[in-house]
Amino acid sequence: MQLSNTLHLLAILCIVNPFLVNAAKSFAGSNLYYAAGLFPADRTTLLDGLQSAGMKVLRVWLDGQSQSQKGTNIDPFPDLEPNQICNGDESCYNDTVLERLDDFMIDAHSHGIKLLISMHSFNALQAGDVYGKEYGTGFFYEQDFPQQAFDKRLQHILNHVHTTLGKPWKELNDYIFAFEAENEAMIGKGQQYIIDHQYWQCDRATTIKNELNGNTGILVTTGGESWMDESVQPDWLTCPALDVISIHAYGVGDYSTSSIKTYVSRAQAAGKKLIMEEWGACYFNTENNNCPTGTALSTSTRNNNIKTWASQISAAGLAWLYWQVIPNADPHFGSDFEIGIGDASWSTLQAAAEAALNADGAFDFSEWLL
Ligand SMILES: *[C@@H]1O[C@H](CO)[C@@H](O)[C@H](O)[C@H]1NC(C)=O
């Protein structure tokens, strides 16, 4: 097409749709809670695969792992606070997990992928890590000391000096997409408890934001809850320290475009971003949000679910991270949303992720992506 024709066409497009030229685009990514435990060959497989799908963000956790997960072999590593609550005692933290992720993020960056770092998990708390052992799943969110000690953990992580880059994580804008205090904080406590303790999330986000010290090149997120409505709490929409409210949703109703759009409007009105930080398509023929075991869906049914739900989420303008892409064939253990690179559903997820890059986004993440 000749230049004059191109300009003519652009001019028409601008008149027809004034939002087209500057429209933000969406994106997709994935989760891998045990990324710090991958052996090098699996890391390469994973990152090559995510890149081939155009995925831009990988969400990782810090919980120590000692055994294979989802059929993936694990190079063991301990919890950041393996023996006791460190409360700022620098010699007490075991930085192995942070150092593993130092290497991982360099490799991810070379694949065009940034990390979303979840700095603790309700799962670890409930399983009786150093915080869970001493405070359980209630006092942890309620008493002053565990909140203060947990803030020191967050500060320790944010100030971890990258082994080879020589800069603290809180300055690594090119490698880190976002920080969040905890995966699914309070999730086992019920929706009313979360409603009653919204401050915990905002207080932790404020600690993170203060530590970022004016650096807006890394986002602060919430870490999600069980479903859409529980994930989007009103006080989080007005918390100055939170940039992004993370949605975790596995119920099919939460994948409806029109339903998602009501939350998009609320977030836009509040000046916050939303992201579908966890979603997945169950391998079994159970309810999608209750996927422990069962009869396998036919490949075509599951692929159709993946394609349909991803496109519905994208159509509402939400960027999304799949739970989870794994580097090995999925062994179909319990809670089976995973898709192994090369599995029967991989090319479907790949296509859905590529399509997200061309979908209009309700929130502009472009300056935080590679
Ligand atoms: C951290 O944990 C690793 C693995 O268990 C161990 O080899 C190392 O000595 C620990 N480092 C510190 C400083 O405790």
Image (tube, grey):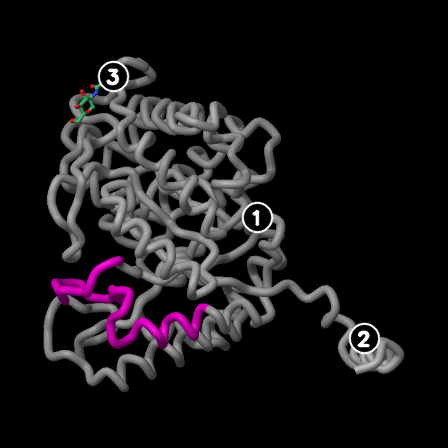
Q: Which mark is residue 368?
A: 1
Q: Where residue 175 sits in the image (x, y, percent)?
A: 48, 41
Image point 14% across, 67% down: which residue? 332
Dot 1 or dot 3: first in sequence order is 3
Residue 353 visible in the displayed image: yes
Image point 46% across, 36% down: which residue? 205
Image point 31% across, 43% down: which residue? 61
The magenta stretch is: 327-353
Residue on which the image places disc 3 = 92
Residue 235 higher or lower than 94, as above or below: below
Image point 42% across, 64% down: which residue? 52
Q: Which mark is residue 14?
A: 2
- Residue 131 vs residue 195: left or right? left
Residue 268 higher or lower than 75, as above or below: below
Alpha carbon separation for disc pair 3 and 2 = 59 Å
Q: Secondary structure at mark 2?
A: helix
Q: Where residue 272 sits in the image (x, y, percent)?
A: 57, 52
Badge 1 crowding class, 10 Å Cα cut-off, few under 14, some 14 to 19, many 20 or more, is some
In-front residue for pair 353/88: 353
Dot 1 or dot 2: first in sequence order is 2
Residue 9 higher or lower than 23, as above or below: below
The magenta stretch spans residue 334:
yes
Residue 27 higher or lower than 181, as above or below: below
Amino acid type indicated by mark 1: Trp
